[in-house]
Amino acid sequence: MYSNSIVTTDPGHVGWGLPGTVQSGLDGTYTWYGSVLYQGTLSEASSTYTVTTATDDTIFVDGFESGNFSAWTSNTSDGSDLSVTTAAKYAGNHGMQALIDDKLPIFVSDGTPNVEPRYRARFYFNRNTVSMVNGNAHFIFKGFAGTDASPVELLRVEVRRSSNIYQLRASLVNDGTAWTHTAWVNLPDGWNSIEVDWRAASGVGANNGGLTLWIGGVQKANITNIDNDTRRIDFVRLGALNGIDPEIQGTYYFDAFESRRQTYIGP
């Protein structure tokens, strides 16, 4: 590219530069060169621009549109109790169906997280035909450190029935073994987007870890001031997890799972 421009300067001085822009998405290093001849003296200059596309902070996305669990690291089912069906869809053509007919946990696992100091996840959940009696409570989502063979729980999302109302809460553990819970939040019938933002403390003594919970895009709780700087998330599970009481029967639907490191996902 060649440009012929007028340079304005004080007598005896030449002060000039090379403005320029590079279109986003064209990663690389670009250098503009220029020269000025002033009263017989040649001066030259250059400007270098490095373009780097912002990193996508997405960790994992799956809406079960493959018709199976191939996108997930693993799945744990009791026979055919965990399946991908068209009936379980929120968006697209498929969703995950979890049939609860005994106390055995059924879930999918995602091992994509990699020692994450911050982890955000959003999924759609429909209680559908699952019935519980007052006092029943169990987990539908968890985040862990370690491996699938030796998991350490760091994050939980729990459903219960109390006074004939279905409710949900989220919890996180500190550097010791103490859990902090959000308040129980009423869970409307039908599809609901559930989103959590889990954060490890930034360093020793910072005590600024936390957990935020949204239902249907509305923030319902925000836990702060947690001492959990040593905690990191390595994998998660989604489904009907442990704590299943004998009275709990029916079919849950899950769909449109997404996890990120930084940015809000939303419904």
Image: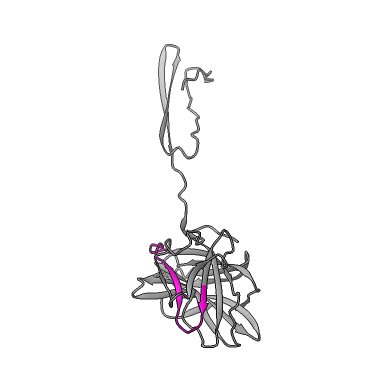
Residue 183 is at least partly visible in this image: no
Please identify the quarter of the rendering in which residue 93 is found: bottom right
Asked if residue 107 shows in the view, the reply is yes
Residue at image x 47%, y 84%? 103
The quadrant where residue 50 appears? top left
Q: Is residue 17 above or below residue 247?
A: above
Q: Is residue 175 left or right of residue 124?
A: left
Q: Any magenta on residue 111? A: yes
Residue 248 horizontal/vertical position (percent): 55, 84
Q: Is 26 or 254 nearer to us in this picture?
A: 254
User: Looking at the picture, how far across and down is residue 224, in whole percent?
Assistant: 53, 71
In the picture as drawn, the residue positioned furthest to the top comes out as 40
Q: Is residue 33 above or below residue 116?
A: above
In terms of secondary structure, what is the magenta stretch mainly? Answer: loop
Name which residue lies at 47% across and 40% down.
25
User: What is the image's colouring?
Assistant: one colour
Q: Where is the C terminus found, in terms of image quarters?
A: bottom right
Along the line of sight, which residue is nearer the eye, 57 or 223?
57
Q: Position of residue 104 (x, y in %)?
A: 45, 82
Q: Is residue 178 above or below residue 206?
A: below
Name which residue lies at 64% across and 71% down.
190
Q: Is residue 26 left or right of residue 132?
A: left
Image mark count: 0
Residue 90: in magenta span: no
Image x and y of residue 172, in percent: 48, 74
Q: Nearer the viewer, residue 30 or 185?
A: 185
Q: Which residues are the magenta region?
A: 98-117
